[in-house]
Amino acid sequence: MKGKATSFDIAHYAGVSQSTVSRALRNSHLVNEETRKRVYDIAKKLNYKVDKNASNLRTQQSSTLALLLFEDPTSDESQINPFFLAMLGSITRACAQEGYDLLVSFQSASADWQADYEDSHRADGIILLGYGDYIDFQPKFKTLLEQNTKFVCWGATVDNRPDLTVCCDNYTGGKLAATHFIAHNRTDCAFIGDASDHSPEFFSRFQGFKDELLTNKIKINERKMANAISTEESGYHATRSLIANNIKFNALFAASDLIAIGAIRALKEANIDIPKDVAIIGFDNIAIASYVNPPLTTVEQNTTIAGQMLVENLLKLIRGEEVKSTLLPPILIPRGSS
Amino acid sequence: MKGKATSFDIAHYAGVSQSTVSRALRNSHLVNEETRKRVYDIAKKLNYKVDKNASNLRTQQSSTLALLLFEDPTSDESQINPFFLAMLGSITRACAQEGYDLLVSFQSASADWQADYEDSHRADGIILLGYGDYIDFQPKFKTLLEQNTKFVCWGATVDNRPDLTVCCDNYTGGKLAATHFIAHNRTDCAFIGDASDHSPEFFSRFQGFKDELLTNKIKINERKMANAISTEESGYHATRSLIANNIKFNALFAASDLIAIGAIRALKEANIDIPKDVAIIGFDNIAIASYVNPPLTTVEQNTTIAGQMLVENLLKLIRGEEVKSTLLPPILIPRGSS
DNA sequence: CACCATTATGACACCGGTGTCATTGCCAAA
DNA sequence: TTTGGCAATGACACCGGTGTCATAATGGTG
């Protein structure tokens, strides 16, 4: 046998028509049990597999989802944010569970990625995953909506369409951090992250943090805030600049664990003890968080559930079912750093 | 316009035949420059994308590679081995660079995964990635070879076909660890991993370690060896059992970083100081390694290069080019734990 | 025995491209 | 004027399935 077997080959050996083979293999009730079995056996013997391209072409769907990972353009090329890797893992699992394949692709936010995967019928829908400056995304979201592309995204809000977003309740997460500091009498707070609205997730975390402090009549000094993107390097430098400017604080809320880990490095270098001098709370609960020294107190986002929700909601969209907006509850994980 | 635009729509608007549209969009020199431009403009306006299913069906190839990740069946469901996540990241990048899409899928070693992706024309080739008991794999490798499926794998050797394997030089890596211990006068060595040949990678690491010690007239006591799979938990328990059995050693070589990290936890709990009482070396250099306390000395496998080599070799196989066997050089990264 | 419903199957168009071959128009060489 | 060659394009089969409609065989009923 040269090349791979087709349904015609099976039809030939089974002495039936190709139509019947196709039906038999899809367990149509229209085919005789005995015939079905004969076809199955021959298919197995020939190592036959349905040609997905032909099948997809005819049925106009692919049983495949595409995951587009947007990287922080400034981040180190060789390392991927562990939080997204964890998400990738859970999304892969969720897809497998639902019988879908997953296409994974890295994208830069500025590129022309809109709709490429879905328009070309490579995927039935798209999952967008990334921190970053979501302002770049809004016009592209519009294009996607216009073309009726099925997609969901993590974190970013798409205007007037909360059903397209799966997101941790970052605001409440920020409040949890503040509550924890207050309970431990650490009220001289600093924040490292991005308090502007370029990064809506970091922004919400900060808002929750600030508001909870205010509820307790504590104000956060603007000088005790530094910008950082979600990398260890960035957290390190932001913290160093606070220290260099002789800014004092006894509590530090970092918008992500990577930032927090960078901050720990900077503080240690400056001989500032954690948690005695400064208590630190991060965000995400990436795997590393429990292994750093001291172990990092953090606000957990459950990536397993997040991945499931993204896949589940996207499939609902594809099937035309109603989707409710999804806010995942954060949990504070107290460890040695606070 | 209902539904997505096809090349016939473009042909209609451009006043040419569909054949010409197809040629124009693929930059055939057979089409007039002016026509090409007109077709391009209309395609852009209609947001046209070539239907990959139709295209793949006709050309009998998919510009897609499949990555099958085999998990240690006993490992925690929710966490993925960070080393493989790093590999996944680099493979994704390498694919993108070569203009290939990547299908990612988790598999259990025992399942019927052979050839599914390639036979169904979803992918042109397969990358197999996983630690684990490769004995399960051998019969499946045979099937793949018989069916002329294009594949490469990480770590596992496929009989008589070294060209199908990309692998770190684990033996040399093991020697590096031994050399380092000897240089620091730590000669009372323990090993945690799997010294049997169920796991060829761990086995080679151990062999290299043992042989280098022997070269220096040092023998490793069998009682100072414990089995573990590549998880933190497993490393923790293996180390605890050594301690419980009152086995003494001043150097510990762990077959992977996760094992080493588990070992660190067990040793700390037993108030054994690292590196004063026991020096530790791991293997992989996962991201966490530099953040644990103390920072873990380890033998690095360069995941970026590894991913590139896997993709590159697979593409060569697909194109029918010759592939040489690939052994990647390990590097010892000295840190605080030794 | 005629009639109809039911079951099992075959024939065929179709999905949207790609590749081959035929066709047309035009210009230069014979 | 005829012939040959080239550039540009169109017509059409084909990739390997799926879905629809037509058809054949079977059995039960009046």
Image (spheres, coloured by chain):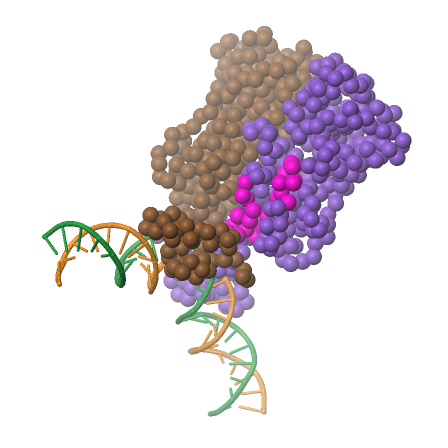
Chain colours: A purple, B brown, C green, D orange
Residue B214 visible to the viewer? yes
Tell me if residue A277 comes above or below residue A120 in the rendering: above
Tell me, yes or no, whether the highlighted magenta stretch contains residue A120: yes
Q: Residue at x 42, y 34 (%)?
A: B313
Residue B115 at x, y = what percent? 46, 46
* Image-quadrant location for residue A273: top right
Tell me, yes or no, whether the highlighted magenta stretch contains residue A34: no
Q: Residue at x 67, y 10 (%)?
A: B276
A236 or A90, which lies in front?
Answer: A236
* Image-quadrant location for residue B86: top right
How many numbered circles are shown? 0
Residue C17 at x, y = what percent? 42, 54
* Image-quadrant location for residue B76: top right
Q: Residue at x 71, y 32 (%)?
A: A194
- The magenta span reads A111-138
Tell me if residue A306 comes above or below residue B130 in the rendering: below
Residue B103 at x, y = what percent? 52, 43
B257 or B241, which lies in front?
Answer: B257
As drawn, the residue found furthest toward the right would be A217
Tell me if residue B208 comes above or below residue B309 in the rendering: above
Tell me if residue B276 comes above or below residue A107 in the rendering: above
Residue A123 visible to the viewer? no
Residue A274 placement, left or right of B141 = right
Residue A186 at x, y = what percent? 85, 24
Q: Residue at x 54, y 14 (%)?
A: B178
Q: What quarter of the picture does the C terminus of chain A occupy?
A: top right
